[in-house]
Image (spheres, rainbow, N blue to C red):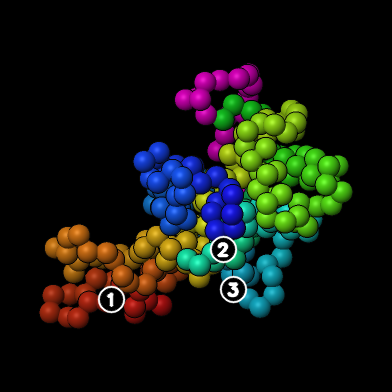
């Protein structure tokens, strides 16, 4: 694995997408397809709740942590930086504020498991049945990060965020394969949660703290919350080249009446 590819380049990518060396853009476009509307916020968080970390992230000072402690945040930053690394195509998940996104989500209703049926019985299910564990997302992240940190420190003598990229990738690959013991939390389940959370944060609306400066949307050419594409309806087979619009920017958008010059994508919103 090298520095310009995600640690899991096959995630969501068809085998015929140049399996020997899938490009970062094709990998992330495939991952983005799994984020409904590229606006996923993991379910239950309200706009009012989620706006706090997003607003703080735009300030000069780092956003105050709401769920993670400082050590967990540093570890999550390092993990996100390897799952979606920065390269010549642009910044990665760390720069996009994925940790801020997850911190806000885990501190809210989604982290508390408000969207889950939690009455049991808890037993192994089929892949089609999805998540079957008793842990809330907050409990899973707290347990999983602690177990991962302990395993790395025991073998390496230092934290994951202090390792080089090659060793970091090796540890994530071991987690992905289930080679680490996080009992009673399956390592593979936690890896999948990390990958999904990182992907959601990278492609979320900036209102929720991730996708800072719309890094993810710009990478894959997603327009965001732009309300009207009437001018582009007949433009078939042409790549969209506008500037993405976030939910906050789109609130003042309106369709232009006939005869008026319509807003260009990404322009005139405030």
Q: What residue is at 47 percent from the left and 25 percent from the top?
A: 128
Question: Which residue bears the numbered disc 1?
Answer: 264
Q: Main secondary structure of the magenta part?
A: loop
Decide whether residue 93 is among the magenta residues. no
Q: Secondary structure at mark 1?
A: loop
The percent position of residue 217, horizontal first and vertical second, equals 43, 62
Rendered image: mark on residue 86? 2
Q: CA distance from mark 1 to mark 2?
A: 29 Å
Decide whether residue 127 is among the magenta residues. yes
**Quick one: label 3, few (<14), some, or many (20+) residues within 10 Å?**
some
The percent position of residue 88, horizontal first and vertical second, equals 50, 67
Q: Is residue 266 left or right of residue 194?
A: left
Rendered image: mark on residue 2? none
Q: Nearer the viewer, residue 112 or 224?
A: 224
Can residue 135 be seen in this snapshot?
no
In this view, the mark in front (1 or 2): 2
Mark 3 vs 1: CB contact within 8 A: no
Question: Which residue bears the numbered disc 3?
Answer: 58
Q: CA distance from mark 3 to mark 1?
A: 25 Å
**Quick one: label 1, few (<14), some, or many (20+) residues within 10 Å?**
some
């Amino acid at each position: 694995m090298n520095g310009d590819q995600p640690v899991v380049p096959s995630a969501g990518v068809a085998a015929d997408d140049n399996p020997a060396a899938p490009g970062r853009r094709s990998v992330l476009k495939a991952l983005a397809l799994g984020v409904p509307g590229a606006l996923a916020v993991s379910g239950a968080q309200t706009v009012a709740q989620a706006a706090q970390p997003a607003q703080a992230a735009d300030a000069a000072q780092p956003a105050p942590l709401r769920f993670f402690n400082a050590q967990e945040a540093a570890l999550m930053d390092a993990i996100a930086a390897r799952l979606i690394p920065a390269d010549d195509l642009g910044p990665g998940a760390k720069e996009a504020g994925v940790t801020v996104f997850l911190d806000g989500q885990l501190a809210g209703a989604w982290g508390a498991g408000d969207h889950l049926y939690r009455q049991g019985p808890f037993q192994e299910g089929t892949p089609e049945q999805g998540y079957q564990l008793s842990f809330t997302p907050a409990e899973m992240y707290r347990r999983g990060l602690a177990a991962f940190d302990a395993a790395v420190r025991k073998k390496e003598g230092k934290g994951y965020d202090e390792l080089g990229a090659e060793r970091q990738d090796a540890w994530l690959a071991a987690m992905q394969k289930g080679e680490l013991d996080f009992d009673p939390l399956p390592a593979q389940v936690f890896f999948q949660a990390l990958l999904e959370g990182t992907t959601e944060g990278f492609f979320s609306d900036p209102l929720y703290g991730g996708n800072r400066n719309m890094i993810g949307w710009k990478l894959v050419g997603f327009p965001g919350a732009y309300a009207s594409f009437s001018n582009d309806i007949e433009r078939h087979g042409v790549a969209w080249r506008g500037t993405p619009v976030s939910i906050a920017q789109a609130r003042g958008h309106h369709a232009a009446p006939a005869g008026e010059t319509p807003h260009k994508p990404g322009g005139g919103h405030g």
